[in-house]
């Protein structure tokens, strides 16, 4: 059984290591690149290399950055008196996409998870507590995920910072906007009822 | 809205140009590579470059190859008296995967399609007719697809080679093995009935 030349098989294998890319998809991608213009394939290869060399982590908020200070931390138009705490850069991107927040961030790099052996020293909690200076920070919004680990992390932060005279808030949970109520899971619906508010 | 550093955004754009890769998937792939070991990302980039430089086309059968002659055409254990005609390398790979064929191939590089302006001179039909020497070739199996273009191409080849004293065959169509009959489409079922055979 001789399917393809070595170079194609190698690229199929490499693509297959990526998350969510199975053998079939990897084959399709490799054959697409084979027929794509030279510059398109070259650009993809160059972008992969550049990614690994140019991306670093902001020394203040630990977001992905191309400078020592990320573009949000360096932006004087953002409100640096408010910190939104997220687990990782994907969650941060989701909040930025919503355009609902104009403060700064703190990227923990995970959540507390005793089962996986992730304790307070394994994520950037000390750095958050170091930034939580009441003279400069008015509010910390805890936007960790709403699963067990995220809730535990939120509780831990709340407990450690409750005496510092900084307003601590948690992002709201509830039914999604524009969604059909019949598809909302039980826990979310309970939360939505519990956190209901007056008009 | 500042989502990611420039290098990540560029790689997301590059991944998005690939077929079947949307913005979300591209974002997931880029962030995966960012956290993947250096050598894994480097290997992927190198494989993409190598693909474009090392893959060529077999001068005999027009399959993808890394030599002047592909590994099947160069293999003395294959039966070079039988040619299986396919539309493209993906179809050839599907037949090789089945391990049901041990002859050689002829890759047309498409199928006749007057609507798309693809005539006999636009695919490698002349090269197939050139190879169809009755002294050396005993059988030509036409394995073009079973859609309109593939059937038209099969008819055209059959018509052009019918007087050459070479056995011309067409791959069988019918219900898939192990499949539930209720999901078989009407045309396939008609073909399965029409081509039924005795025990």
Image: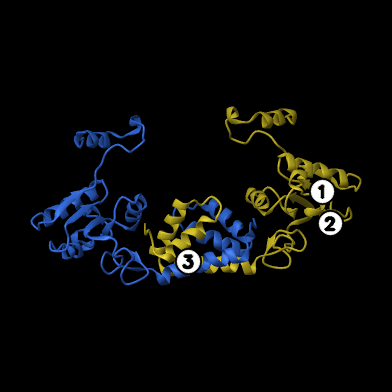
Chain colours: A yellow, B blue
Residue found at x 24% / y 50%: B150
Residue B121 x, y percent position in the rendering: 19, 63
**Residue furthest to the left:** B163
> Of A69 and B105, which appears nearest the observer?
B105
**Residue furthest to the right:** A163
Q: Residues within 10 Å of mark 2 (few under 14, many from 20)?
A: some
The answer to whether dots 2 and 3 both sit on one chain is no
**Residue furthest to the front:** B77
- Judge whether B197 appears above or below B123 on screen: above
Q: Quadrant of residue A8?
A: bottom left
Element carrying mark 2: helix
Q: Tag 1, which chain?
A: A
Residue A187 x, y percent position in the rendering: 69, 30
Q: Nearer the viewer, mark 3 or mark 1?
A: 3
Which residue corresponds to mark 2? A131
In the rendered image, the quadrant that contains the C terminus of chain B is top left
Residue found at x 90% / y 47%: A165
> Of A141 and A107, which appears nearest the observer?
A107
What is the CA distance from the residue labelled 2 to the residue labelled 3?
A: 44 Å
Q: Tag 2, which chain?
A: A
Residue found at x 56% / y 67%: B42
Which residue corresponds to mark 3? B48
> Of A133 and B146, which appears nearest the observer?
B146
Element carrying mark 1: strand
Which residue corresponds to mark 1? A139
Q: Is residue B16 left or right of residue A123?
A: left
What is the CA distance from the residue labelled 3 to the residue labelled 1?
A: 48 Å
Q: Quadrant of residue B184?
A: top left
């Amino acid at each position: 059984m001789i399917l393809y030349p070595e170079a194609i098989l190698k690229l199929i294998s490499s693509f297959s290591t990526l998350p969510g890319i199975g053998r079939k998809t990897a084959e399709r991608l490799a054959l697409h690149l084979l027929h794509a213009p030279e510059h398109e394939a070259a650009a993809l290869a160059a972008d992969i290399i550049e990614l690994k060399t140019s991306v670093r982590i902001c020394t203040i908020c630990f977001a992905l950055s191309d400078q020592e200070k990320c573009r949000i931390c360096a932006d004087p138009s953002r409100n640096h008196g408010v910190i939104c705490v997220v687990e990782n850069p994907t969650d941060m991107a989701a909040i930025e996409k919503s355009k609902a927040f104009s403060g700064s961030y703190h990227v923990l790099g995970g959540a507390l998870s005793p089962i996986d052996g992730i304790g307070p020293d394994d994520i950037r909690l000390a750095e958050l507590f170091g930034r939580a200076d009441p003279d400069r920070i008015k509010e910390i919004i805890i936007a960790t995920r709403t699963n067990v680990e995220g809730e535990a992390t939120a509780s831990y932060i709340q407990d450690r910072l409750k005496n510092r005279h900084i307003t601590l808030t948690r992002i709201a949970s509830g039914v999604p906007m524009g969604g059909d109520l019949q598809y909302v899971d039980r826990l979310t619906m309970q939360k939505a009822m519990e956190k209901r508010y007056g008009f």
